[in-house]
Image (spheres, rainbow, N blue to C red):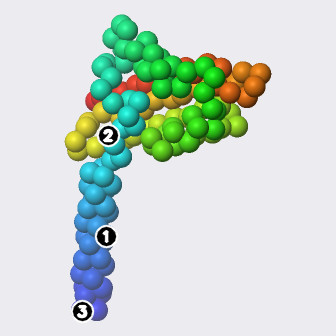
Amino acid sequence: MRGSTFRYVASGLLAAALIFAFGLRIWWMRSAPTLPQLLQGLGDFRESGNQEAYQRRLKQRFPPGSDAAALARALTEDGFQTRPALKEASFDRAASFDDKCRRGGNVRWSLDEDGRVGDVTGGYYAYCP
């Protein structure tokens, strides 16, 4: 009798753990972060001209001569993970219930002789199952 009670309790705890894990996964997928403003509204990254449109967007937002610290701060506030010492930033978002695609992008910049932004470049992607 004791063995069967233990099996029932163990089975119940295992079922509860699995349900909790599944619920946690659903909650995590549902709460995907919004895309950074720099990545919003871009077309299919493989279509001609779309990567160039992202490049133009970066250069308009961070023109040569801009403050490099302000660039890093703006990217961080927009949701990118910045590495100012490497002069790069990236964003990667997993798929969610609302958007089945994994999306992301990166930004790299150089500094001029005065320590200000020299050039900004980057790319973006979307992997859809």
Quarter of the picture holding the C terminus: top left
Query: Could you tell me which secondary element the residue under label 1 belongs to?
Result: helix
Disc 2 from disc 1: Cα separation: 24 Å
x 26%, y 55%: residue: 26
On residue 7, the disc is none
x 45%, y 41%: residue: 78
x 51%, y 39%: residue: 74
In this view, 65 is above or below 70: above
In this view, 122 is above or below 91: above
In this view, 55 is above or below 8: above
On residue 1, the disc is 3
Q: Of the two numbered discs 2 and 1 on the same chain, state the one appearing first in sequence.
A: 1
What residue is shown with label 1?
17
Disc 2 from disc 3: Cα separation: 47 Å
- Foreground tag (3 vs 1): 1
Residue 30 drawn at (x, y percent): 26, 51
What residue is shown with label 2?
95
| Kind of residue indicated by mark 3 | Met
Disc 3 from disc 1: Cα separation: 24 Å
Residue 84 drawn at (x, y percent): 65, 38
Total residue callouts: 3
Query: Could you tell me which secondary element the residue under label 2 belongs to?
Result: loop
| Kind of residue indicated by mark 1 | Ala
Query: Could you tell me which secondary element the residue under label 3 belongs to?
Result: loop
Residue 127 shows up from this direction: no
Residue 112 drawn at (x, y percent): 72, 21
| Kind of residue indicated by mark 2 | Ala
Q: Of the two numbered discs 2 and 3 on the same chain, state the one appearing first in sequence.
A: 3
- Residue in front for this viewpoint, 32 or 17: 32
Q: Are marks 3 and 1 in contact (CB under 8 Å)?
A: no
